[in-house]
Amino acid sequence: MTGSLNEQEFIPVSKVQRAAKFISTGAKVGGNYVKHYAKKVVRPGLDKEELHQNNASDIYNSLSQLKGSALKVAQMMSMDKNLLPRAYQDKFTMAQYSAPPLSYPLVVKTFQKYFGKSPDQIYDTFTRSAVNAASIGQVHKATKDGQTLAVKIQYPGIADSVGSDLKLVRPFALRLLNMNERELDHYMEEVEEKLLEETDYNLEVQRSREISSACAHIPNLKFPNYYDEYSSDRIITMDWIEGKHLKEWLEINPSQEARNKIGQALWDFYHHQVHNLKQVHADPHPGNFIVQDSDQLGIIDFGCVKVIPEDFYSGYFALIKKDLLIKPQELDQIFFDLEFISEKDTKEEQLYFKGVFREMISLLGKPFHVDRFDFSDDGFFEQIFQLGDRISNDKMFKKSRQARGSRHGLYINRTYFGLYNLLNQLQAEIDTTKPDWLK
């Protein structure tokens, strides 16, 4: 079989090929704007929905062929739902599990490079087509000695193109995210570091084992075993976890009790990582979780792990306390340490940004302020979206000459936002455990 129609025989690997792809996409997006404004002359009341739809399709189709960091950034943007017009969210969410897979000959080439053998010579059976394809790699199902296995293969050239890809994705990110350049560059460094870690499969296996064993005591969680003899820098072999992706599971309309059980397992998993391990699975999108028939939650991807520095942790979570009984001087110090305000700010700016970040963190902290929280409360999420909207359109924010917030906050905010989002999709009600010092 030479691969199905939607499989890719080739990934643009060189900088020139990848840049050319970005330029042609930029030209398409530019063309969409021209078409939009031409139509607007005839229909002055025209909104931007069709423009967003066209741009989202063109950008997604292009990024999904390039794979790698560019597609990963699209995936991250789709999680921060209040940052993007809905058309982009819907399209970019697909990056989480439905990029076009690589054809079998390219998979064989990777195996030859790392093991000197083809998959058929290593496993008893191996699916020629990928069962799942995402931004950095794709998964095949295999068997060996009666064990069913998941084999994750990284796309060729991805690790080498992280830095150059992020430079190329910058203009799209600036346009779509409504950020200033300083802010974007401040975060891009953190994103680049994390993406490079994600291409290091040896590090992923090491972290998977560490976190899995440290969380083994938590009820209703399931972790795969990893097999060193069939793993390498660019290939990971692990147990196949049977079940449905979170999204598919919700389509079978599970009972409220089952939703709460899965939601509680998620909350407990994140609670233990953040507050006890100080390192966290920082990629909580639905594609990374599998629900088994016994209502156990399988955790299948530890590529993106954020190690939380102690000083960042204590400042950030101090702000989540319900009654902020911190002396004004101490509070100012926390705001400086977390880089929400700086010496360059005027008094007015300091006052404004302190107010905004207190409001933002106390909103994120709401579930911590009660013993049990109902994540089906859409009003809570509406408040988060409205605050995001208000801030991104605020003059004070737009004219700010510097990035706001420690770069460590990028993945921690994203982790909590992603977690809350999953719990909202589950419509789950949760016992919100907290660290002792936060009670």
Image (cartoon, grey):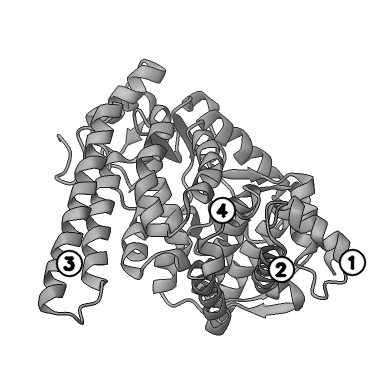
Q: How packed is label 1: few (under 14 Cα within 10 Å), some, or many (20 or more)? A: few
Q: Quadrant of the C terminus?
A: bottom right
Q: Quadrant of the N terminus?
A: top left
Foreground of the two, 78 or 19 = 19
- Residue 351 is labelled as 2
Mark 3 vs mark 4: which is more N-terminal? 3
Tell me the distance, in whole angstroms, between the alpha carbons under discs 1 and 3.
Answer: 53 Å
Mark 3 vs mark 2: which is more N-terminal? 3
- Select label 1 or label 2 by which is in front: 2
Mark 1 vs mark 2: which is more N-terminal? 1
Badge 2 element: helix
- Select label 3 or label 4 by which is in front: 4
Tell me the distance, in whole angstroms, between the alpha carbons under discs 1 and 4.
Answer: 28 Å
User: What residue is pinned by disc 1?
Assistant: 327
Mark 1 vs mark 3: which is more N-terminal? 3
Kindly identify the residue that appears in the image at 75 percent across and 67 percent down.
Answer: 320
- Residue 377 is labelled as none
Kindly identify the residue that appears in the image at 31 percent across and 27 percent down.
Answer: 120
User: What residue is pinned by disc 3?
Assistant: 36
Q: What is the three-letter code of the residue carrying label 1? A: Lys
User: What residue is pinned by disc 4?
Assistant: 401
- Select label 1 or label 4 by which is in front: 4
Tell me the distance, in whole angstroms, between the alpha carbons under discs 3 and 4.
Answer: 32 Å
Q: Is residue 439 left or right of residue 246?
A: right
Badge 1 element: loop
Extreme residue toward the top, this view: 116
Kindly identify the residue that appears in the image at 24 percent across and 59 percent down.
Answer: 55
